[in-house]
Image: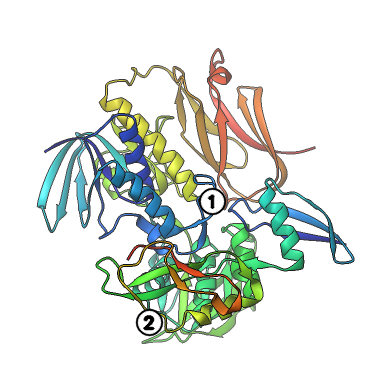
Amino acid sequence: MKQELTCINCPMGCALTVEIENGEVLSVTGNTCPRGDIYARKEVTAPTRIVTSSVPVKGSPYTRMVSVKTEKDIPKGKIFDCIEALKGVELNSPVHIGDVVVTDAAGTGVNIIATKEA
Amino acid sequence: MKKEIVIIGGGPAGLAAAVSAYDAGVRDILILERDETAGGILNQCIHNGFGLHTFKEELTGPEYAARYLKMAQEREIEISLNTMVLDISPEKTVTAVSPERGLFTLEAEAVILAMGCRERPRGALAIPGSRPAGVYTAGSAQRLVNIEGVLPGREVVILGSGDIGLIMARRMTLEGAHVKCVAELMPYSGGLKRNIVQCLDDFNIPLLLSHTVTAIHGKERVEGITLAEVGPDRMPVKGTEEYIPCDTLLLSVGLLPENELSKSAGVALSPVTGGPVVDETLETNIEGVYACGNVLHVHDLVDNVSAEAAKAGLSAAAYVQGKKTEKGDSFRINCGRGVRYTVPSTVYRDEKENVTIRLRVDNVYKNASLNVYFGEEKISGCKKNIFTPGEMETLILLPKQWQGREGDLTIALEDNA
C-alpha cells in the first residue's frame, strides 16, 4: 500500500510517498532531508505534533501573555489534553525562554516550556 | 543628529540588517521601532516552524526574534522603541517622534527600509453588508489571542487561506472556538502545504476552494455570512449561496508591503510586489536607500527575510564605508511565462558576488522547470514536481553566467517533457 503525505517539518512541505506492507514501512521517497524520512515513518504509525499556546503572566514589564510550547513532539491524539493541562496556569515574572511551565503535560512525559522572556 | 545607518523597523528584517552592517564594521547604527518591543510580527507568531534554515533547529516566532535581539544586544546596537517614523526625505533626513525624544530628525548616510507589511483589510474587499463587530484580519485576531489573551469569537468562518488564516484556524480551535470552514477564492491555497496539513486536516476543518463570502449579516455583531462558489472568472455562481451562522469572520486575504515612507522618500515602487524596485545590492532608485524583508516583497519564510536583510546590511555598510564601486551598465531580469516578479529586477554587470534571485510564480504548475535564459541561450534550470504561488523560489546566479553575455536575462516556467 502506498500513502501520500506532506511533510510538516519545515515550510518546504515535501510531498512524501510511503510504502507500507502489513503495518511496516518499506520505503519513504520524496523527502529532501532526513527529517522527512523520520516524519513519514512516525506519521503512518504514531503521528506526533508540537503544541504551542500562550498563558497569562503577572508583573512583567513587557507583556501580559507568555508563549509556550511542548519541549518535544507529543502524540497527535494528546493535543487537546496538553491544551487542557495549561488551563488555569498563570506565571509570575521573571520568566525566561526554556523555563518549565508544566511538567509531564497530560502524561506524555514531555514538559511545556516558555518561549518568550517576560 | 547624524547617523551612518538608520534602519526603519525592528522586526526580523531590521534586526538582521543591523547585525550584518555591524559585522561589516559599521558602528553608528540606529534602529527605529514603533512598537514597545523589537521583534516585529514574530512576537505574535507563537507557533513553531521558524529557523530551520538559519539556526538548523525548529523555533517558535518569539524564540527566533529573541535570537536576533540577543545578537543586536551583544553588539550594543541602539534600538529606539515606541518611535514612529513620520517622514523620510530624498536627502535621507528621517523625521520621527517618540515619547522620550519628542519630534526629532536624523541625517542618515544610508537608510534601510524594513517596515514590513500590513494585512489587506475588509475595506479593500468590497463585501456587501453592514459594519458589525466581529470582522477581524487574521493577524489582529492573532494579536488578540496570543498577546492580549482575548478570544475574539466562538463561531468562526475564515475567508482566505493565507498562512496566518490557517495558523489562526488551529489557534482558535485550540482555544475553544469552532472554526466552521476556511473559504478560498482561488482554486488553490495561498498558504504553505504543511499548514493545511497541521492546521486544517488535523482538526477536520474544511478548506473550500473556489468559494467566497458574498455578504456579511448582522447589525451590532456578525450573525452570519453568505458563502458562494465562484466560477473560473472568480465571480459568485448563482444558486450556490449558503447562509452560515457565525459570530466572527477572519480575513486572511493577502499582505501589502507598507511603503508610505518609501513614497515620501521618492522610492520607485513595483506595481506587482507593491515594494521598492531594487538592484542586486537591494538599493532602491534613491542612492543609499536600501530595502529588505516584507516591505520589499512578501516572504513565505522568515529565514529568507533574515538572509535578504543581511545582504541589505552589507550593502549599506559598503556604501557608508565608501567601498561601493561606481555602478556601470546593468541588465534586466525579465519575467517570462509563469513568473510574477523577481527581486532584484536589475543586476549590475560589474557585480563580483553571486546574486540571489527571489521570485514567485503566478499559478500552480506541476512537473515544470524554472529556466534562466540570456537571450535565446539557456544558462540554467531547476526542475520541481510542483511550483505554487504560496512558496517563494530562490535562484543563485553566478558572475560567470552573465560575464561575457549580452542583453537581458529572462526567467520562465516551462513544462517538463
Mark 2–mark 1 contact, CB under 8 Å? no
Return the residue at label 2: B132
Look at the image and tell me whether residue B238 can be seen. Answer: no
Q: What percent of the width, then of the height, locates residue B199?
A: 58, 68
Indicate which disc residue B388 carries.
none
Residue B315 versus residue B295: which sits nearer the camera? Answer: B315
Give the chain of mark 2: B
Look at the image and tell me whether residue B172 can be seen. Answer: yes
Assess disc 2: are there few (<14), some (14-19) or many (≥20) residues with their C-alpha within 10 Å of its C-alpha. some
Q: Of label 2 and label 1, which has the lower sequence position?
A: 1
Rendered-image quadrant of the C terminus of chain B: top right
**Residue B285 occupies which quadrant of the picture?**
top left
Residue at the image position 33 percent from the left and 36 percent from the top: B290
Give the chain of mark 1: B
Residue B88 versus residue A95: which sits nearer the camera? Answer: A95
Q: Is residue B235 above or below residue B347?
A: below
Return the residue at label 1: B57
Residue B293 versus residue B21: which sits nearer the camera? Answer: B21
**Residue B348 occupies which quadrant of the picture?**
top left
What amino acid is at disc 2? Pro
What amino acid is at disc 1? Glu
Residue B208 versus residue A54: which sits nearer the camera? Answer: A54
Q: What percent of the width, then of the height, locates residue A26?
A: 85, 56
Q: Nearer the viewer, mark 2 or mark 1?
A: 1
Q: How many marks?
A: 2
Residue at the image position 50 percent from the left and 74 percent from the top: A103
Q: What percent of the width, then of the height, locates residue B333?
A: 51, 30
Q: How is the image coloured?
A: rainbow
Q: What percent of the width, then of the height, locates residue B226?
A: 54, 80
Rendered-image quadrant of the N terminus of chain B: top left
What secondary structure is found at the residue carrying circle 2? loop
Mark pair 2, 1: CA separation: 43 Å
